[in-house]
Image (cartoon, rainbow, N blue to C red):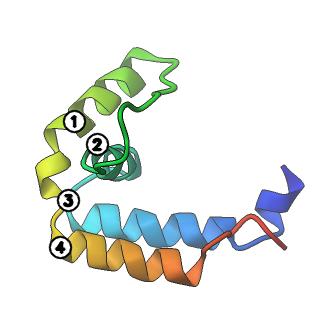
Amino acid sequence: MGRYKQSLAQEAVEEYRKIATKFNMTPTELSLAWAYQQPHVASTIIGATTMKQLKENIMAYSKKHLINDDVLAEIDVVYKKYRDPSKL
């Protein structure tokens, strides 16, 4: 876990959180909605341990239409800045 706290991972997460908020999604919804619309992704594995998390994960599927070119462009900027944020 140390590598995540001593790296750029928290900064990257915050940047993705800002994108999610800007487009009226939670970070979970943003990440799953993005994954759902990727042509090379056949399925996603969700890790819900509570009913609240399960509902949020399921709702993400209904938000996949929100992943438009504007959202993808912002995600791409963050990805290019933090390609592997867990490395020190």
At 26% from the left edge and 38% from the top edge, which residue is drawn?
60
- Which residue is at the front of the view, 11 or 84? 84
Q: Which mark is residue 69?
A: 4
Point out residue 83 in the picture as x, y percentages from the top left corner: 61, 74
Residue at mark 2: 36
Q: Tag 1: Cα neighbours inside 10 Å, few (<14), some, or many (≥20)?
A: some
* Residue at 41% over, 32% down: 44
**Mark 3 → mark 4, Cα distance in angstroms:** 7 Å
Relative to 12, residue 57 above or below: above
Closer to viewer: mark 2 or mark 3: 2
Q: Cβ–Cβ below 8 Å for labels 3 and 1?
A: no
Q: Residues within 10 Å of mark 2 (few under 14, many from 20)?
A: many
- Which of marks 3 and 2 precedes in the sequence? 2
- Kindly identify the amino acid type of the residue bearing the numbered disc 4: Asp
Query: Looking at the picture, does residue 71 appear above or below residue 55?
Result: below
In-front residue for pair 22/87: 87
In the picture, measured across the screen, residue 25 lies left or right of residue 44, that is left
Disc sitting over residue 67 in the figure: 3
Amino acid type, mark 2: Tyr
> Sequence-wise, which precedes: disc 1 or disc 4?
1
Query: Quick one: SS at disc 3?
Result: loop
Q: Quadrant of residue 29?
A: top left
Q: Nearer the viewer, mark 2 or mark 1?
A: 2
Using the numbered discs, state the Cα–Cα distance from disc 2 to disc 1 in whole angstroms: 7 Å
Q: Secondary structure at mark 2?
A: helix
2 and 1 marks in contact (CB < 8 Å): yes
* Residue sitting at x 11%, y 51%: 65
> Where does residue 76 sit, x and y in percent of width and height?
39, 76
